[in-house]
Image (cartoon, grey):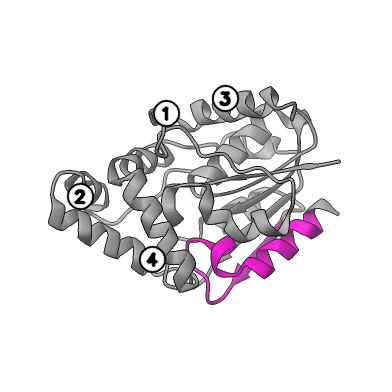
């Protein structure tokens, strides 16, 4: 029987709570809080997070038939895991993901650094997090804002730097696990269509584009994402 694992990123609270709907819908699924979110120290690379996750899973006896779902950093970790340990992974659902360094708006990293030092900028950062979660139901959105308060902008800064070092273009052809890619087409940040690049590079992959969804499809269009996970696990 497959073990479903959800891996979070720096947005949607920067913690496992972003998978609120999935954890309700899939009893027995797992969703760890990554190091530095907020407990412990952030790690330096996607590979480091992958090894941490693998150790965490193996400690719980989960070492095969893994279905990994992630967004942004979590999607990078899931993809790295499937490339490094193909015999342990039975499927992947990746949201808001790139297989190469992302192109960011000027000042995006500095904004997080300043938010960690200046109370006014910190509030602007929280307002920006609220804006990017515009498609998430208000009560959940506010719970995720509280998660952001706890995790903080420095953790998010570290995550963005880590994501921007991730590059598996030279290995993507090795991927064996069935792959589903999900993109929210109304993302207010208007990122490049990185998911399409992966879809074109992986024969047999499935690519889902959702309207009224942005950076966090699992929280914005949970029924559609849950259905895609069910189909992947069938």
Name the residue rendered at 40%, 34% in the picture: 36
Q: Is residue 154 above or below residue 43?
A: below
220 relative position to 192: left or right? right
Classify 10 Å Cα crowding around label 2: few (below 14), some (14-19), many (20 and above).
many
| Discs 3, 2 touching: Cβ within 8 Å | no
Q: Residue 162: horizontal and vertical position, in percent?
A: 40, 36
Question: Going from the N terminus, do you reach mark 2 or mark 1 first?
Answer: 1
Q: Residue 110: horizontal and vertical position, in percent?
A: 20, 47
User: Element at badge 2?
Assistant: helix
Can you tell which mark lies on residue 43?
A: 1
Q: Which residues are magenta?
A: 206-232
Residue 122 appears in the figure: yes
User: Element at badge 1?
Assistant: loop
Residue 22 occupies which quadrant of the picture?
A: bottom right
114 relative position to 91: left or right? left
Q: Which residue is mark 3?
A: 51
């Amino acid at each position: 029987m497959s073990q479903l694992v959800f891996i979070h990123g720096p947005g949607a609270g920067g913690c496992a709570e972003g998978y609120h709907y999935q954890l309700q819908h899939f009893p027995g699924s797992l969703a760890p809080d990554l190091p530095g979110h907020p407990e412990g120290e952030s790690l330096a690379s996607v590979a480091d997070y992958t090894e941490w996750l693998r150790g965490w899973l193996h400690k719980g006896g989960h070492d095969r038939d893994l279905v990994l779902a992630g967004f942004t950093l979590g999607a990078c970790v899931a993809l790295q895991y499937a490339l490094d340990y193909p015999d342990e992974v039975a499927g992947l659902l990746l949201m808001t993901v790139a297989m190469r360094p992302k192109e960011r708006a000027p000042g995006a990293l500095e904004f997080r650094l300043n938010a960690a030092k200046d109370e006014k900028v910190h509030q602007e950062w929280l307002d920006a997090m609220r804006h990017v979660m515009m498609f998430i139901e208000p009560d959940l959105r506010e719970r995720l804002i509280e998660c952001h308060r706890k995790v903080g902008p420095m953790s998010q800064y570290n995550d963005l730097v880590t994501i921007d070092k991730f590059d598996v273009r030279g290995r993507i052809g090795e991927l064996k696990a069935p792959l589903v890619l999900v993109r929210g087409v109304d993302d207010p940040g208007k990122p490049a269509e990185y998911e399409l690049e992966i879809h074109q590079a992986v024969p047999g992959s499935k690519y889902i584009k959702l309207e009224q969804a942005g950076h966090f499809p699992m929280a914005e269009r949970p029924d559609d994402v849950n259905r895609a996970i069910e189909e992947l696990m069938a």
